[in-house]
């Protein structure tokens, strides 16, 4: 099925910079040299996320003030931390041979030591700074007797799952970023600790919540959505044959698995999950929204071929109320203030902590050693 979202949840675009509500449920703190940085992502198919903009998966990210259930905002896995892991795997402090090559170019070797040094000079320091910040948060939470309960984590997981439409979609998104559910749980645990540490300094009034709701009232509303199962085939004759078999009692899901050309849905029995208007090809939407539940369409001509559509569920449009969104907005405003306070708070904690950084020291020592060796 030609889904404009195509369920590629990693294909997200930056949210409107005017957004003023942030949600800690869908964000993590970027602990980079004591500066709180933010990334915001929304479900937009037109622009892929630039890898250079991916930040550590602990940041508090601003998000669309739509209540977040309509925007698939989620924590971004850090390329920086991935590089840090590569550094450790490539060259631990007691690595055996500095001259071991990681690549050759026309017979000329690129040594593991040189590669390691470049990583440290580039992303390594940033990654370590972020990990140091994360450890400081954990230590401060322990000193303050701050505990994150399973109920806290379950609440956040539920919110993530709802924002992605299903647990399957969430798992696919995690997999696309090289994360597991366990990684997400660790990030949630960290973010909750940070929020609880800083929340005593934060005050969100009922008036602020109301002003935010009034400013973005339309975006809190939920549009009409439908859920369908589809079978895509190449010709109209094939589509008519599918319909004949369905009317004869053949199971739709089994036919989708055996006959459909739509690789995105066939293994799920043709299930598209819920979608609203503007998310599918116009011909598909027009047909799907006209169907009654469990009704099967006539062949629908699309850009990919012909589809047979079965409506499996429908959600009517809903106009949100302040009472429904009050807690969600409050959490978003709290997250916004957490983001603003984090940099200063971390710098203060770092200034009082005893921190020994052997990673950059080791890199510097190796560089000096290499220069001495070259000059001999």
Image (cartoon, rainbow, N blue to C red):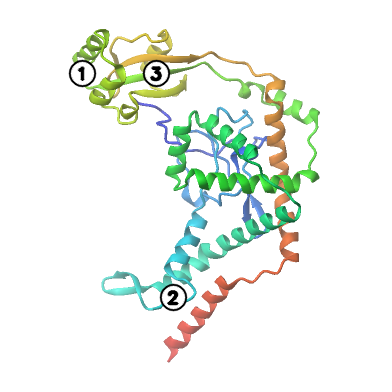
The residue that mark 3 highlights is: 228
The residue that mark 1 highlights is: 235
Could you tell me residue 141's position as x and y percent? 71, 52
Q: Which mark is residue 95?
A: 2
Residue sitting at x 42%, y 32%: 7
* Residue 211 left/right relative to 70: right
10 Å crowding of disc 2: few (<14), some (14-19), many (20+): few
**Looking at the image, residue 44 lies above or below residue 140:** above
Q: Earlier in the sequence, mark 1 or mark 3?
A: 3
- Res 2 quadrant in image: top left
Q: Nearer the viewer, residue 293 or 309?
A: 293
Residue 10 visible from this viewpoint: no
**Looking at the image, residue 209 lies above or below residue 134:** above
| Quarter the C terminus occupies | bottom left
| Quarter the N terminus occupies | top left
Q: Earlier in the sequence, mark 2 or mark 1?
A: 2
Could you tell me residue 72's position as x and y percent? 53, 33
* Residue 272 left/right relative to 219: left
Residue sitting at x 72%, y 39%: 334
Could you tell me residue 306's position as x and y percent? 27, 18
Q: Residue furthest bottom?
A: 376
């Amino acid at each position: 099925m030609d889904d404009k979202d195509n369920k590629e949840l990693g294909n997200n675009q930056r949210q409107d910079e005017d957004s003023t509500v942030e949600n800690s449920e869908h964000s993590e703190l970027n602990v980079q040299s004591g500066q709180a940085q933010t990334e915001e992502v929304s479900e937009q198919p037109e622009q892929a996320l630039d890898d250079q903009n991916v930040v550590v998966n602990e940041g508090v990210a601003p998000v669309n003030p739509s209540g977040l259930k309509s925007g698939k905002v989620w924590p971004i896995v850090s390329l920086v931390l991935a590089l840090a892991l590569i550094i450790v795997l490539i060259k631990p402090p007691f690595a055996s041979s500095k001259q071991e090559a990681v690549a050759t170019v026309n017979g000329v070797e690129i040594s593991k030591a040189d590669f390691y040094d470049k990583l440290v000079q580039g992303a390594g320091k940033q990654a370590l700074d972020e990990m140091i910040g994360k450890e400081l948060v954990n230590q401060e939470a322990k000193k303050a007797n701050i505990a994150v309960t399973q109920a806290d984590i379950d609440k956040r997981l539920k919110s993530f799952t709802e924002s992605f439409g299903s647990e399957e979609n969430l798992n696919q998104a995690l997999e696309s970023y090289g994360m597991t559910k366990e990684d997400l749980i660790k990030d949630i645990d960290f973010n909750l600790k940070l929020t609880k540490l800083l929340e005593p300094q934060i005050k969100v009034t009922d008036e602020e919540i109301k002003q935010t709701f009034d400013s973005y009232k339309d975006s809190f509303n939920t549009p009409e959505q439908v859920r369908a199962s589809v079978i895509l085939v190449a010709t109209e004759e094939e589509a008519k044959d599918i319909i004949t078999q369905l009317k004869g009692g053949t199971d739709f899901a089994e036919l989708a698995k055996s006959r459909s050309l739509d690789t995105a849905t066939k293994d799920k029995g043709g299930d598209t999950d819920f979608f609203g208007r503007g998310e599918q090809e116009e011909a598909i939407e027009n047909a799907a929204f006209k169907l009654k539940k469990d009704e099967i369409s006539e062949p629908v001509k699309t850009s990919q071929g012909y589809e047979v559509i079965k409506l499996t569920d429908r959600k009517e449009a809903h106009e949100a109320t302040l009472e429904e969104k009050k807690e969600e907005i409050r959490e978003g405003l709290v997250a916004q203030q957490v983001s603003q306070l984090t940099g200063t708070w971390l710098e203060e904690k770092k200034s009082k902590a005893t921190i020994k950084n052997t990673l950059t020291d080791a890199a510097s020592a190796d560089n000096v050693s290499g220069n001495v060796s070259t000059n001999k």
